[in-house]
Structure formats: structure tokens, C-alpha cells
Image (spheres, rainbow, N blue to C red):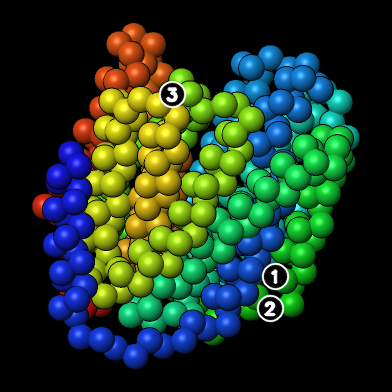
Amino acid sequence: MAKAVAGYWLIMMQTEKSCEPKQKAPLPPLVWATSVVSFFTDFSSELIYPLLPIFLTTTLGLSRQFVGLIEGIAETTASFLKIVSGRLSDRAGMRTPFVIGGYSLSAVARPLLCVASSGPQALFLRFLDRFGKGVRSVPRDALINDCVPPEIRGRAYGVQRAMDHGGAIAGSLGGFVLLHYLGVPTRTVILLSAIPGALAVATVFMFVRDVKSCPPATEKKKDISVRAALPPRMRVYLFVLVFFALGNSSDAFLLLRAKQMGVATAFVPLLWAALHVTKVIFSVYGGNLSDRVGRRRVIVGGWLVYAGVYAGFAFAVGATAAWLLFIVYGIYFGFTEGVEKAFVADIVPREVSGTAFGAFNLVVGLCALPSSLLMGRVWDSFGHRYAFLLGASLACVAAVLLLALVRESQRVKV
């Protein structure tokens, strides 16, 4: 597995060197504005997200099953709303109302968790937070696509993801400092998440505007189904994506495995922060690389890194190995998160990009639950080694199918 990943990496690097150097066009101000919004939003979210399970079980006295119910409903809501908001933004020819509404709703609901005193209240507020995410995410991604030329799409989405992960680092470390060094109560930390949330909403109001080149869908397109709105190549890509998504279980299993390998509980937040550092570094690099050598090659490289990391967790021992694997795991995110969005934008017409992004997120979201259930069942029944090797195998299958079935867009010069 390691030799296969290294070999593919070498081929990709040689391809990059063979490309003619080009002068890079500057990113539009709108890309930077949405990236700053993502930074503040993830700062706010990650300030409290690592604390939520403890807050819900210890402070509110909820069972683990109820916590799972809260998170399951919240994430499923976000996944289904992404296809709806993307479709509606295409038909309206406007993105910003969805972006403003989604960020505003989350910025209000998230800090209100500090006053929750029961399970139903926490469920409702968490639902509103994820409702806002479902409303804003796809129109924001489509808005970036509206304002950037194809040759710098990878870089644009890479910068947006890097800023998002930068906010996650700031939030995780901020929560650690507030709790462990300043002794701030958990409810107060949750309330303080309102500050970066407010900065995110203020940035949206001041700097995020619709792009005039985003036309509303025609009357004929308004009535066609989501399936008919997506070109055949996009539908094949979604089919391939199912194989990878079914092996892409919750990162909670990686944290459990890291603890099993000897990482102390007190260092888990720092391990999580280290992962996000790698994400920041490779998100920009992965986006730039995809602009030069093509999206498909970079995505396949990322999926092979994922397979290598999962194979590593199957066989590695010791806390040091866990740290190294988590750091390498960030390369997978850097090579896929932004690049996959750029690839979607490459293979669909701009006027249905919101629908396409929504379908992409819906497939990933719908596979999240069965993939995690499958991972947990195999782990419980046959041990961690078989569970992680299953994830690695599905990633390799998806990589082969992507190369075999989905053509690279002509808009990306290889």
C-alpha cells in the first residue's frame, strides 16, 4: 500500500514539473471574503464542538444514545438541506440570501446552547445550527464558482478550505486555553462562541455579493428533475463517490484507535489541532496542484493517501505512530476537499452548479451513517485491523473507478 501511494505521488510530481509555468491570476476579493467568513465560523464552531459531548453527558446528564440522536438528526438535516438550497439558488439566480440567512441562523443558535437545560432544548438548538449550515454551504461554494475562472478554481477552493481549517485550529486551541489555563466554565466558553460568529456574519453583510454572471435558470430548467439537470459525467462521478464514501467512516474511530495506541486523553485536542495544521498546509498546495496537473489525478492521490493511512492504523502500534498517521491524514483532506469541489464545477454547467454541489454533499451525507455503522460493526465483530483495511480497500476501489470511468474536464489543462 505504501509503495503504491509513493509511486503515484512520484508520477504526479513529475507531471507537475513538466507543465509549463504560468503567471497566476489573482483570486477575486469575493473568494477572500468567503474564506474569512469560513475562518470565523469554524473558529466559533470548533471552540465548542469538542466540548459538546462532555457538556451534554455531564452537565445536562444525557445518555450517549441521545447524544448520538442529536448529532445524527443535525448532520442528516444539513445533508438534505444542501441539495434543496443549491437547487433553489440556481433557480433564483441568487446565492447571497441563502449565505446570509444560513450564517446568521448558526451564529445565533450556536451560543444559545449555553442556556440549554434539557435534551430537547439542546436538540432544537443543534438542529438550528446545522439547518443554517445546510442552507449556506452549497450556495457559498457555487458563489465561489461564479466568480473564478476555471484555471484557478483549485486554488480558490483550496484557499477557502485552508481558511476554514485555520479557524478550526484557532477554535480548538482557544477552547483549550480558556478551559485549562483560564478556568472559564464550559457554558461561558459556549457563550463566547458568539464573538467569532458575529464577526462572520458582519463580514458576509459587508463584503459578500452576488456575481452578475450567475443567471437564473430558465423556465424550462426550473421544472426538470435534479437527475436531469446533472450531466452524465456528474452522475457517474457520484456513483464512484459512493464507493469511497462507504469506506469514509467517522473520524471518531480514528480518535478511538489513537487512544488505543497510547495517546493520552488530555492530548487528543492537540492531536486534532495537528491534523488541522496539515489540512491548512496541503489545502492550498492541493488546489494549486490540481490547476496544473488536473483534478482527477490529485483526487486519486488523496484517496490513495487515505487508503495508506487506514492501512497504517490497521497495523501500526504506539502513540508516536498515531501522531504521524494523523499528520499524514491531513494530506488526504488537502488533496480532496477543495479539489473535489473544483472538479464538480469543471464538469457541470455554471447555471446548475448549486444543484451539482447539493447532490455531491447529499451523497456524502447519506453515506456517512451506513459507513460508520459498518466500521463499528466490523470492528466489534472482527477487530480494528479488518475494519480499517475495509476502509482502505474501498478507497482503492474508488480510485480505480475514478480513473476508469470519469474523464478529466477539458477546462483543466494537464
**For discs 1 and 3, the disc positioned in front in the rendered view:** 3
Q: Earlier in the sequence, mark 3 or mark 2?
A: 2
Name the residue type under label 3: Met
Residue position for label 3: 261
Q: Nearer the viewer, residue 291 or 231?
A: 291
Dot 1: what SS? helix
On residue 181, which mark appears? none
The residue drawn where x is 43% and y is 23% is 261
Dot 2: what SS? helix
The residue drawn where x is 80% and y is 21% is 60
Residue position for label 1: 204
Q: Nearer the viewer, residue 178 or 126?
A: 178
The residue drawn where x is 21% and y is 73% is 16
Instruction: Say how many tags the image has.
Output: 3
- Name the image quarter holding residue 272: top right
- Name the image quarter holding residue 231: bottom left
Instruction: Evaluate if marks 2 and 1 touch, with contact meaning CB atoms under 8 Å apart.
Output: yes
Dot 3: what SS? loop
Residue position for label 2: 207
Q: CA distance from mark 2 to mark 1?
A: 6 Å
Regarding residue 392, the answer to whether it shows in the image is yes
- Name the image quarter holding residue 230: bottom left
**For discs 3 and 2, the disc positioned in front in the rendered view:** 3
Q: CA distance from mark 3 to mark 2?
A: 46 Å
The residue drawn where x is 15% and y is 78% is 18
Name the residue type under label 1: Val
Name the residue type under label 2: Phe
